[in-house]
């Protein structure tokens, strides 16, 4: 899996790439500026070095965020899932897991371990702060404890895209045996959390409590993050409910097989006579050798079709082009994404040919589903 644009690989942990988005460096500078007065109060006279201390704290904070994400990754690995990478960015981090949870228990375990890890780190830092001497170490431990406890508690808010939203989805999924309903409930929880974030700032302002411009900006960023993430989850849930209608068998084109040395003209004549929408080629020993490409076929002028071999307008055949005819929904999408092509040979369990699946047919039906999910 390629590295996303705008990211820098800083290392690998347990075979998992750790990526940092460029936006993290902006946050590191913001933290350095915000921490500078506190650093100056416990260690006067540092001058410009107080900003360096702030950057060091930003690194320390994101190491704890990294531990949060590693816990997600390790639990996912324990369930046999592939973990592509861990990405750190302006708003924290995300673990890129290759497949969705298959059970409510998997969803719950993968989700809840992150906030518990942050709370655990916060408690350890708080314990360290109780015995640390005054100075920068005490300041760092207090800030680390506060940040991790805040991250842990806020991540348990029951709304997607937060971990707490995944926990809620798992509970609804497990209790009512309906994953789709769990996603919808958790997504609306995320939207409610987004609204409450903005309302909280407004209420504090009305009560006359001090609300800085930074507080307002951060509340706006967090609310936008929650709303967009929740909305994306809601749309995804609606799409996934329709995915079972995406069936390889239903989309298959009627197929004929012809010798690979046959002319284009004769192959087209036979296809029309048999009302077939796809042509598969066989070699002299009867083995499948290719699938005719529709665009290449259309490019051959009528007057030349009697002289051009059908093999010249086909794609060479290999096993990556073979799909089960009974694939539906997400399994079909996953199989196609693993082996991108224009045409696939659909086969029955006994190995017999059912038909040919053209990617344009899949795209057309998928586009209709995408329009209907909004």
Image (cartoon, helix red, strand yellow):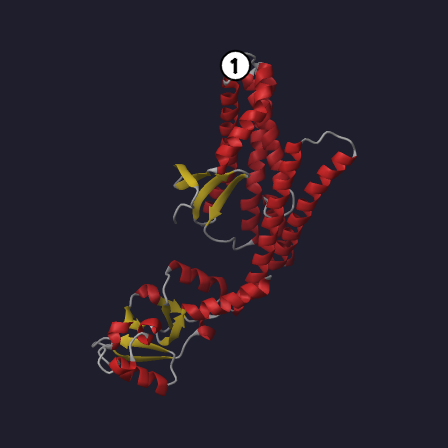
* Quadrant the C terminus occupies: bottom right
Task: Identify whether 64 is placed above or below 84.
Answer: above
| 53 relative position to 179: left or right | left
Residue 104 point in image, percent of width and height? 57, 53
Q: Nearer the viewer, residue 306 or 317?
A: 306
At 44% from the left edge and 60% from the top edge, which residue is drawn?
Answer: 334
| 72 sits to left or right of 285 | right
Q: How crowded is mark 1: few (under 14 residues within 10 Å), some or many (20 or more)?
A: few
Give percent across and percent down for residue 297.
31, 75
Q: Is residue 128 visible?
A: no
Q: Pick the residue in front: 238 or 49.
A: 49
* Camera-side residue of 82 and 232: 232
In the image, farthest residue toward the right: 207
Question: Residue 194, located in which quarter of the rendered image?
Answer: top right
The total number of labels drawn is 1
- Can the viewer see residue 283 in this picture? yes
Q: Where is residue 233 in the image (x, y as percent from the top left)?
A: 58, 53
Specify the quadrant of the image occupied by residue 138: top right
Label 1, on which residue? 46
Which residue of the protein is positioned furthest toward the bottom in this rendering?
273
Q: Residue at x 73, y 39 (%)?
A: 202
Badge 1 marks a residue whose secondary structure is loop
Q: Which residue is drawn at 63% across and 37% down?
A: 217
Most extreme residue toward the top, as rendered?
A: 45
Residue 165's place in the image compared with 354, above or below, is above
Q: Where is residue 352 in the image (x, y as percent from the top left)?
A: 35, 76
- The residue under the point 43% across, 69% down is 360
């Amino acid at each position: 899996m390629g590295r996303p644009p705008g990211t820098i690989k800083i290392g690998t942990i347990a075979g998992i790439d750790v990526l940092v988005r460029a936006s993290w460096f902006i946050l590191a500078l913001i933290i350095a500026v915000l921490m500078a007065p506190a650093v100056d109060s416990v260690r006067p006279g540092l001058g410009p070095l107080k900003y360096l201390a702030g950057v060091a704290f930003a690194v320390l904070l994101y190491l704890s965020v990294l531990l949060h994400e590693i816990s997600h990754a390790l639990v996912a690995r324990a369930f046999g899932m592939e973990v592509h990478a861990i990405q750190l960015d302006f708003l924290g981090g995300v673990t890129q897991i290759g497949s969705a949870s298959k059970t409510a228990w998997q969803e719950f375990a993968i989700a809840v371990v992150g906030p518990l890890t942050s709370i655990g780190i916060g408690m350890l830092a708080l314990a360290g702060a109780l015995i640390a001497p005054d100075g920068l170490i005490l300041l760092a431990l207090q800030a680390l404890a506060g940040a991790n406890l805040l991250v842990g508690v806020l991540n348990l808010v029951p709304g997607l895209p937060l971990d707490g939203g995944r926990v809620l989805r798992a509970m609804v999924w497990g209790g009512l045996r309906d994953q789709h309903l769990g996603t919808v409930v958790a997504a609306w929880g995320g939207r409610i959390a987004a609204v409450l974030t903005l309302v909280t700032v407004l209420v504090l302002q009305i009560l006359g409590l001090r609300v800085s411009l930074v507080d307002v900006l951060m509340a706006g960023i967090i609310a936008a993050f929650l709303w967009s993430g929740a909305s994306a989850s809601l749309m995804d849930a609606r799409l996934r409910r329709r995915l079972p209608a995406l069936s390889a068998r239903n989309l298959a084109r009627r197929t004929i097989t012809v010798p690979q040395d046959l002319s284009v003209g004769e192959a087209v004549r036979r296809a029309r006579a048999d009302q077939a929408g796809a042509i598969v080629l066989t070699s002299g020993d009867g083995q499948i050798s290719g699938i005719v490409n529709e665009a290449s076929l259309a490019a051959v002028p009528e007057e030349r079709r009697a002289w051009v071999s059908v093999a010249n307008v086909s794609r060479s055949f290999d096993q990556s082009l073979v799909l089960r005819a009974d694939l539906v929904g997400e399994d079909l999408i996953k199989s196609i994404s693993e082996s991108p092509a224009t045409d696939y040979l659909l086969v029955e369990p006994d190995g017999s040919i059912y038909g040919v699946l053209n990617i344009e047919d899949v795209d057309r039906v998928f586009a209709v589903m995408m329009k209907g999910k909004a």
